[in-house]
Amino acid sequence: MKVVILAGGFGTRLSEESQIKPKPMIEIGEMPILWHIMKIYSAYGYHDFVICAGYKQHLIKEWFADYFLHTSDITFDFTSGNEMIIHNKHTEPWRVTIVDTGLNTQTGGRVKRIQDYIGNETFMLTYGDGVGDIHIDELVRYHQSQGKIGTVSVYNFGQNKGVLEINGSGLVSAFREKSDLDGDLINIGFMVFEPQIFDFIRGDEDIFEQGPMKKMVEDGQLMAYTHHGFWQCMDTAREKQKLEQLWASGHAPWKVWND
């Protein structure tokens, strides 16, 4: 089963870094967050990736083209004809297809543009800026058991403060600690779709989370898989710092793979 990663946006909320590189190439612990996402899927045996690139897409291609340089010790021997010797070569068991899906294409359009690389197969889809300890195998089994076109992973951010219950007149009737019942369920990516999803997308102008997904909801074809563990996106500098600190601690919750 292929894994499709949306990696073509501008990342304007992280403008200091996204001015020089695509948001999925912003690093956590000296490796792009895109690499972290791929490692999560790879830990569950999913190694075939299709990356929907756009903004500064050449930098994604160049990074993978030089992957040996990023992960190995190198000797440049200029005494014998400019030979390059790769030591302790470490490669991932990955097949990576990077598709230029356009600079201003919306998320739905990006998915539509990679249809030829998916064919008539079930595939997974996620965003290029969020990590979590998602049980990918459970997600896939849940999707397969439901018989619907799509399944999205949802997560309850909850509250991080005490909760006040207030009646109609403004009187505080209760004060309690937060619970899992507080907060809204949000789509965190880590989705699974049948190939019929392509029929819901009209073209480049379609925002995936609006037209196509709303149409699936109307048709009763979208299921929700609730994730109860860790998840964090990297939308802001503060969120990037949080992920950096977790990685530096040696206990990053999304590191579900072995070194």
Image (cartoon, helix red, strand yellow):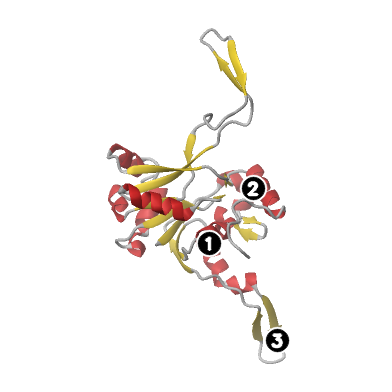
Q: Residue 224 lies in what quarter of the image?
A: top left
- Provide the secondary structure element on which disc 3 rests: strand
Taking the image as shown, residue 208 lies to the left or right of residue 158, namely left
Reading the image, the residue beneath label 3 is 77
Residue under the point 62% across and 50% down: 253
| CA gap, disc 3 and disc 2 | 38 Å
Please name the amino acid that badge 3 sits on. Asp
Residue under the point 32% across and 54% down: 194
**Label 2: how many Cα within 10 Å (few below 14, some 14–19, many 20+):** many
Percent across and percent down for residue 226 are 46, 42
- Whether 65 is drawn above or below 16: the answer is below
- Provide the secondary structure element on which disc 2 rests: helix
The answer to whether residue 104 shows anywhere in this view is no
Q: Nearer the viewer, residue 206 or 180?
A: 180
Please name the amino acid that badge 1 sits on. Ala
Mark 1 or mark 2, whichever is nearer to me: 1
Tell me the tag on residue 240: 2
Mark 3 or mark 1, whichever is nearer to me: 1
Percent across and percent down for residue 161 are 64, 28
Taking the image as shown, residue 248 lies to the left or right of residue 215, namely right
Please name the amino acid that badge 2 sits on. Lys
Q: Quadrant of the C terminus?
A: bottom right
| CA gap, disc 1 and disc 2 | 23 Å
Reading the image, the residue beneath label 1 is 43
**Label 1: how many Cα within 10 Å (few below 14, some 14–19, many 20+):** some
Residue under the point 55% across and 68% down: 64
Q: Residue 52 lies in what quarter of the image?
A: bottom left
Q: Tag 2 or tag 1, which sits nearer the N-term?
A: 1
